[in-house]
Each structure stands twice: as C-alpha cells, then as structure tokens.
Image: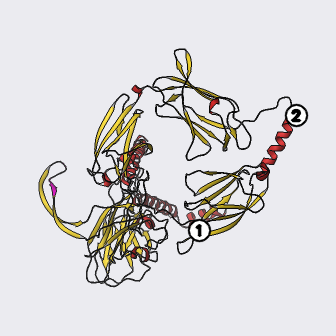
Amino acid sequence: MDKLYFCIMLNCKFPNMGMYFRKIASIAAIIAILYSCASVGRIEGGPIDEAPPHFIASTPDPGALNNTKKKISILFDEYIKLEKANEKVVISPPQVQQPEIKANGKRVVVELQDSLKSNTTYTIDFADAIQDNNEGNVLPDFSFTFSTGTVIDSMVVAGTVLNASNLEPVKGMLVGLHNNLVDSVFTTKPFDRVGRTDSRGRFTVRGVAPGKYRIYALQDADQNFSYSQPTEAIAFNDSLVIPSMEQRTRKDTIWQDSLTIDTIVDQVYTHYLPDDLILRSFKEVNHSQRLIKSERLDPRKISLYFSAPADTLPTIKGLNFNEHDAFVIEQTTGRNDTIHYWLKDSLLYKRDTLKLSLRYLYTDSLQRLIPRTDTLNLVAKNKLKLDKDIVKEKKKKSKDKADKEVQFLSIDAYVPGSMDVYDYISLTFTEPIKSYSKDSIHLRQRVDSLWQDVSFDIDRDTLDLKRYNLYADWKPGESYEFSVDSTNFKGIYGLFTDKIKKEFKVKKLEEYGQIFFNITNVSNPAFVELLDAQDKVVRTVPVVGGKADFYFLNPGKYAARLVEDRNKNGKWDPGNYKKKMQPEMVYYYYQVLELKANFDLIQDWNTMMKPLDKQKPDELKKQKPDENKKKKSSSNQKNRSNNTGSSNFMR
C-alpha cells in the first residue's frame, strides 16, 4: 500500500515520471543484451573456435638479457586457462622452491621463488598446458626464455623415453642434463637443465649451452631433481651428449588463395641435434633385505613377507612350541621373499598365539647383510570365526544325526572340454597334500566304442606345492576321460578328496596355425615372447640359430617381443646405475600378425630395421597420445554443437 501511494504521488507531482522510468527500463534491457553478447563464451550454434591462443606481449620481453625480474607476465589475445600446470610446466634451471604459476584472464603469471642465478639462461617450458578458455584449444610447445646475463643459450636436446621392459612410451618423466660428468652427480646434485616427457614419451631440453653433458631420466618422487630413492625409475645414456646445430632447408608453400598454389620456396632454418636420443627407463631391483610383515590369517598357516629374496631360508625357533618337523614350507614365488609355513599338528594351529624367534639376513645402513633375530607373537586372526563355525556345525549335527554330511578336501580341476595338444591337466588344492596314489588316477582314450588306459606322468608344480600337473601325449582329434577315485588325495589335515570324472576332446591339427620368425641382428642368448592383442605373453621360446618357431597356435592376432638374455636366466632383467649396467635389450616385431587356422606365417625379423621408439605397434600401446584424445573430444564437441545449432534454428 505504501509503495502504491509513493508511485501515485510521484505521478501527480511529476507527470512525465512514468515515461522517464519506461525509458530507463528500455535502456537497461538493451545494455543487458549487449553484455550477454560480449561476455566470455560463444552463442550456441555459431562457428567453433579452433585456433589456439596467440602471444601478444610479455614482461620481461621474450629473450630479454640482463633480466632481474622474478615475476614473468605473458599476455595472450584471448582468455586462457592452464591445465595441470604443476605437472606440465618445467623450468630450467630446476627450482628448489615451487614457483607460483597461474592464469589470470588473458595472462599467464609465473613468479619464481628461488634467487636468480647470474649469467644463466632461464627457460619456462609450458608444453601443452596453455589452452583457450572456451574450447580448450591447446597452444602446443610454448616456451618462454630470458637470461640474467648477456647471452641466451639456445641449444636444444631432444629424444624419447621408453619403458625398457616393453618399449611403452613413458609420460611425465623428468629428463635432465649435467655438465659435471662425474657419475655420482646424478645421486647428489640437481640437474642443470630439465625437460619432461609428453604422452608420446618425447622430451625437449631447451636453453642448453655448448659443451658436453650426461643425460638422465628420472621419476622424481621426492622432487629434488636427483636420484635419491631406489624406488624411483631412472634411465641413463652410456655416451656423452654434445649439443650442436646445423642449417637445413625445407619447402614452404605460398598460396594465392585456399585452392591455388602461388610459389614453393626453399626456407633455411636452424635444426638442433641430437634430436633422437633413446632413454630406456627401469627400476633397479631392490636388494635391501628386511622383514616387511608377518601374519597368521589362517590359524594353520604362518606367512612371512620379505622385501627381497635371500639365498637361504630364515630359521624359526618355537618359544612356546616345538618347531622340529612342525611345518610344511611353501615358497609361492619360487624364491625366498614370500614364505608360508603350514602347521602340521592340530594342537599347534588351535592355539590362540604362537610365539617364535625368527633369525634371518638383514641389510643394515651400510648395505651389509647381517644376521638379525626378531621375536614374533602370531595371533590367529580368524579364530573367533572358526569357533563360531564349529558351534554351528555341532548344532547341525545334533539336529540331524541321520543326515551326516561328509566333508571333502576342496580341489580345483583344470580339465578343459577342448584340450590343446600341448596343454596339461592341473589339480589345485587348498592345502598341501600329504599322500596320494597314482593307481587311483585314471586316463583313458576312446577307441571305437571302448575306453583304453593311457600312460601319463603326474608331478607337483615347481612353484606351487598345492598344485599337481598331469602330462600325456595327446592324440589330435581324439576323445579322453579323466577320473580320480574317491579319497585318493589326502591333505595334511586329514581331509580326502571326492571323486572326479571329466571327459574332453583334443583339438585337431587343422584348427591350429604356426608362426616362424627368422631373426637377424640379435646378440647374446635371447628368447621371443609371443603376445596377444593386449600385450600379454602367450608363449615363450628360445632363439636357436636365428629362429624362433611357434607351433599349435589358435587363430587370432599375435605380436612378438624379443629379449636379449645376457645372464641366461630366462627373464628380462633391469639395469643397475652403480654398476653402469643397462637393462637387457628388448625389441618388438613391427606389426601385429593375424593368424588363421591351418595356416603358416614365415616372418623375417631384423631387430635393427626400425628405431626402438617406432617398433612397438600402436595398437599394443597402453599410453596413447593426448592429441588423439583431444581430437576425439573436439569431434564430440562439434557434434554436440551441430545438434544444438539445429535445435536453436528450429525454434
């Protein structure tokens, strides 16, 4: 009521006031429309901005000499944003104190916290961190340089970092140069110049002065720019790096319009070398021996976990029990770093706590292996659960004594219905086996309408004492029956297995294909790993006389990886920086092969035909280039825009 009275009084006293307010409202509406058109963003349905931001100016100027400013401000032609600046932006020389890097409207502001070094070229490499604010268009390979002295060092060193074991590009790894050529500097001093690998594993170290350098790659976990932790992945080059440059010529095209070429001219430019360094990264084997943990999750089993394998088993002395002949020892990895001790006596595993003295080899602060003794109190973690199960079982038995259920020892029988000619039957148990009879295991082949016994061998697995493998000479295309009599296998805790009976058929030879590799340029003993389309090992064979032959392969896609096995241990081994030992060489066959049934592929394989970074087929790589992801994202964005534009037009 008061508002209405106020409006009436205004109209009475100022008769043109209503018209005045209407004009003000119209002007405000026009200003609002103009503001919405000028705001950051684009009108839906309009053309998509595909151009990256453009550099306009900076303070200090690009390439400034005798600079003393620690704050760098760089202006672009549009609003920008930074993506993962702390990960992507690299400053040389490396900064001990983390610099402040932020986007502010159309500017990128970098504020260095360390004191500036005299007569030094500073390079801020943004990689692909700078994007425009609207569409996320990337400004690639943008870097900014200034000097605190009278000279700009302009040399560039470039290359690729690969995972030494599988030639996978390594993203986000630090690559650094040292002009101090002493080997120990890598472990004691920060780098002089640094770069970082992109999604292709490529790196560029800028602002390098003429001279001789050692080059390293480092997964810098503690961000001190030196190799200080044995868990950090590293790479090093055996040869010195000597930066150089040369004049090269490229063809440049001058266009009359978008369709007509005017002139093709030769353009001279400066190219920096080396630009093709290959660094193979690896993690050193941890030789530091210590007890990681001990546990007794199952009352019947004591588990010990060590940080590294040892040549001998630890010694156990029972403090509240007699350890003599008390265990069945299981080394699940075939080494001495994970050990399970199965308790034989039920009087022992029913105890709440087992107290023991453990004597083992321990690596001290001087990296010496010395004897160490620990006292362990191992409590059965799930004893309470066991007691509840026992009570429940007793209630069940008392409720229905007539229907007493027999408990059998669990067994997992691997007997595929379609057996490969090279395969074998496996029986895996939940506890070690105390005894069994081969006579109660039967293997028969169907001949016409009758079953005939077939000879076989059965052995305990070399890596898992709870597994047994049965081998036989399968006849392709024939049918077989495998059976085990009831109560044949007896576990160490008194339970027997139930009977087993399974039929299967062996595949015909026509269902397989073969791949034969003729290999050149390979040294040392070597083996070839046949891989599936997911880069997983299918089969391994040694290289003999320059040949690696794979028989009885199922149809499908295959790749191949060759490992030079210099120590003849049948596996790939990483390097060792202290010993200046590079990781064992790995090569990939350059393409994925598609094998059909009843077909043989014969492939010539020259391991040096392509550089290492071009050998692994793209379809096997897990680390995909970021630009591919961005193209896909841009395509999706265009589709969404087109759909939105059509929708707006229809309205």
Determine if residue 394 is in view. Answer: yes
Q: Secondary structure at mark 2?
A: helix
User: Which quadrant of the view contains residue 355?
Assistant: bottom right
Dot 1, crowdedness within 10 Å: few (<14), some or many (≥20)? many
- Total labels drawn: 2
Q: Residue at x 56, y 43 (%)?
A: 461
Q: Split into 4 quadrants, where in the image is the C terminus?
A: top left
**Residue 45 appears in the picture as rendered:** no
In the image, which residues are magenta? 251-258
Q: Main secondary structure of the magenta part?
A: strand
Residue 489 or 191: which is nearer the viewer? 489
Residue where numbered disc 1 is placed: 362
Q: Quadrant of residue 584?
A: bottom left
Say which residue appears at 85% left-offset and 35% top-offset.
397
Q: Residue at x 32, y 41 (%)?
A: 517
User: Identity of the amino acid at label 1?
Assistant: Tyr
Estimate the x, y position of residue 146 in percent, counting from the top left.
31, 77
Q: Is residue 392 left or right of residue 649?
A: right
Query: Which residue is denoted by mark 2 in the rendering?
Result: 399
The foreground one among 172 and 38 is 172
Within the magenta stretch, is there residue 331? no
Mark toward the viewer: 2 or 1: 1
446 vs 363: above or below: above
Mark-to-mark CA distance, 2 and 1: 55 Å
